[in-house]
Amino acid sequence: KSAGMQEVFDLVKRVSQATANVMINGESGTGKEQVARAIHQNGPRAQKAFVAINCTAIPESLMESELFGHAKGSFTGAHQRKKGLFEEAEGGTLFLDEIGDMDMALQAKLLRVIQERKIRAVGDTVDRNIDVRIIAATHKDIKAAIKNGGFREDLYYRLSVIPIVIPPLRHRREDIPLLAETFLKRFSAANGSR
């Protein structure tokens, strides 16, 4: 009900039809992934995959393979070719949650993918064309990270073509009763209680 969230909902409706990359900024628990899903589900890519990855949940050493895939034999244990998340999201949306925690070397590779619209699996010699909309999210102050050398400015501008800021709940107290009721219904139904 809050004015801040009504602005977010309005922006989601407008950007869902666009093809530009989106950067969602908001504190933990503000619903960044729900906003990303709403953009995907209300746009022309809705019938294709929505693939989400939390950039902090996967060790840096595996993140490149997770995003771009790997060729058979590219490293110990790579017994077959593995599709990366970009390929899984082909035609759809790739949601990169907590992008602010991504390693600088991987940021450079991601920038190249965005610019060229091609990926190369780890250990492969062939580039593959991709058609994926990227929605990134973070709770960090990316502009401060850029100043401190922790995030690439050129990548930020490629990802943040359309920025969306989700206000924290403390700035929209009128939403608390509605959220409390929603969660109460959800957990009551899940636990078979009233």
Image (cartoon, rainbow, N blue to C red):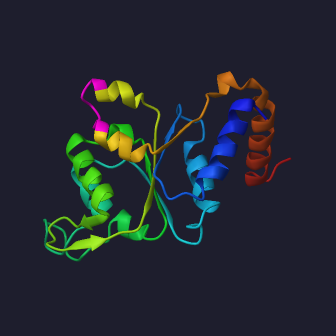
Residue at (80% x, 36% y) in the render: 178
Please tell me whether residue 91 is drawn above or below residue 108 in the rendered image. Answer: below
Identify the image quadrant of residue 103: top left
Is residue 181 in sight in this rendering?
yes
Task: Look at the image and give the residue range highlighted in magenta.
Answer: 147-153
Residue at (37% x, 47% y) in the render: 158
Residue at (82% x, 49% y) in the render: 193
Q: Residue furthest right?
A: 194
Query: Could you say where residue 176 lies in the image, as x and y percent from the top left?
Result: 75, 30
Quadrant for the N terminus, please. top right
Identify the image quadrant of residue 37: bottom right
Query: Could you say where residue 81 lies in the image, as x and y percent from the top left?
Result: 24, 76
Residue at (25% x, 61% y) in the render: 65
Please tell me whether residue 138 is drawn above or below residue 71 in the rendered image. Answer: above
Q: Nearer the viewer, residue 18 or 4?
A: 18
Q: Nearer the viewer, residue 189 or 177?
A: 177
Principal SS element in the magenta part?
Answer: loop
Q: Is residue 22 magenta?
A: no
Query: Could you say where residue 82 lies in the image, as x and y percent from the top left?
Result: 28, 72
